[in-house]
Amino acid sequence: MKTIRLSGLVLLASTNLLHAAPVESHISAATVYLDRAIVTRMATIELVRGEQALVFERLPTGLLDQSLQASGRGTAGVTILDVNAQTAYVDFTPNERVKELEEKLKGLLIQHRALDDRGKILSEERDFVKRMLLASTGTVIYPLGGDTAHGGGTAARPTLDEWQKLYVYSEETFGKIAGEAQSLDNQREDLKAKQEALQQQLNELRGARGKSFKTVTVRVAVSDPGRLDVMLKYAVPGASWVPSYDARLHVADRAVELSYFGLVRNNTGEDWSDLALTLSTARPSLGGGAPELSPWIVDVTRPIMMKVTAMPAAEARMERAGKGTQAFNQLADAASAIRELDEEKDAGFLAATVEAGATSATFKIPVAVTVPANNTMQKVSIASAKLAANLQYQATPKLLEAAFLSAYAVNNTDYPFLAGPMNTFLDETFVAASRLKTVMPGEKFELALGADEGIAIKRKLVNRFSEDTGLTSKGRRVTYEYLLTITNNKKTAERVVFKEPVPVSRNEKIEVNLLTPAEGDVGTAEKPKQVIREADGKLVWRFDLKPGEKREVPLKFSIGYPGDLNVTGVE
């Protein structure tokens, strides 16, 4: 068995090929990045001695020529000479899916035309009946010189019986025409909806449609005849994937079951059927190195002197084109940088194989996957993990008298959790749609699980009074007194953390005094106590409440300032 590979791509236009043979190939694998995909095509052929051209036809027009790689393995003795990519233009749509949609749309247009033609016929029938009724009410003049019986000039009018028959006929005819016209309108509406749906699908596949395709020719020199398995790799735009998560908290187990998915889209123009799918976190669009930083220049402002000089038209066009290209490249680079997952048993998820590289990670999906080229989302499973969770309730009673449950877990898997949307469940109940930030293996992360009525919180203003202070100078002091009540109505012990604001003075003449809790009972982040003060003045309480336990927390503080000072922030 021999293996050959063309590592450096050479795009040449070969002319004197001895044999040109179109090969039957299929897509065997695809590696999907955040903005493109690397597709692998396989073909098995029997080769004879001599120089030959292996032709891969009808490949996507968006194929990136510089990404082409060819390799082979088999019993034949082969040397790959070069790889050539050319664009072929045709008078038909080469993309089978787009062609199928176009044919369906054409059929709907024919049906619509048939309905319009039938509508015209109905309109003519209605006009005919109207003319017949109009004629029946007029005077019929027979030839001169005769009577009614012998063709005289006396007028003849319909009898009452004839009027009744004419009325019944016209009523039935108009009714049938109106009913069929309404049916035609309904059919037109249905056809319009189908046409819009097909047109939308065509618009989504617009990058893959058109009247052209790529033909790739691999030129080989065969020294020993035999079998060769040819592998052609190329990059195509129009493919992407994003991570998605389902997080399910099992309260009884104090654990989070996290399901990791990849949402894959394929708009490359080629259907992927039963292939080996790999998802990569690499971002090729960012390039290989960090961008260059321009110097930060600080200088004296100088007046701008305008000088108009004649410039040849061709030179001016070249200069404008150069500036435009530079600006376009800068915008493209910025956009690429911004663009930047017999006893009944529960069904499980397959886990992808993760490979961590120096700069990225790849997830190899363990089963064959089919992703049609219709730009619809395909959900594939990457991993599922059960993580131990620490539960904690958090509240800000001044803003909302409710306790919100959070679960803290550690990513103890080998998988990096990329940032993406997350559906959160509390046991079997859907509670929130949120977003997970990027979490690397070994990192801690938080899951917000929404409000829980099992923890009751009440905040009451007990007293607020103002008083004059000072003997020699007139001052003012406002005192606030609150009572916060926290009740654990659950059957399990729970930790509750809540915050309350205490005013922060930005002026030396304004004095804020914390009365309850006493200053000696308040700790800091470095020296924690049951209640600590944060840098911005907020007080944070942490309680471990037993089942059914009720805790009352008093809060009292005062704000003192000179009476002639206009103070803001005093409620």
Image (tube, helix red, strand yellow):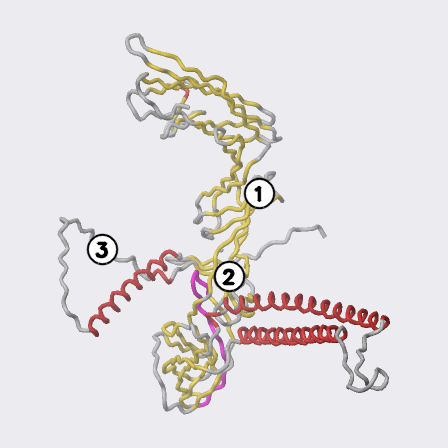
Mark found first going from the N terminus, 1 or 2: 2
Cβ–Cβ under 8 Å for marks 1 and 3:
no
Q: Judge by depth and name the residue closer to the eye, 535 or 203.
A: 203
Q: Judge by depth and name the residue closer to the eye, 463 or 354.
A: 463
Q: Quadrant of the C terminus?
A: top left
Indicate left or right for 490 with 14 as reference.
Answer: right
- Please give the residue where the numbered disc 1 appears in the rendered image: 431
Residue type indicated by callout 1? Val
Circle count: 3
- Please give the residue where the numbered disc 3 appears in the rendered image: 294
Indicate left or right for 167 with 552 as reference.
Answer: right
How far apart are labels 1 and 3 at the CA level?
A: 48 Å
How far apart are labels 3 and 2 at the CA level?
A: 38 Å
Q: Which mark is residue 148?
A: none
Could you tell me which secondary element the residue under label 1 belongs to? Answer: strand
Q: What range of the chain is rendered magenta?
A: 31-48
Q: Residue at x 40, y 74 (%)?
A: 69
Quadrant housing residue 510:
top left
Residue type indicated by callout 3? Ser
Q: Residues within 10 Å of mark 2 (few under 14, many from 20)?
A: many
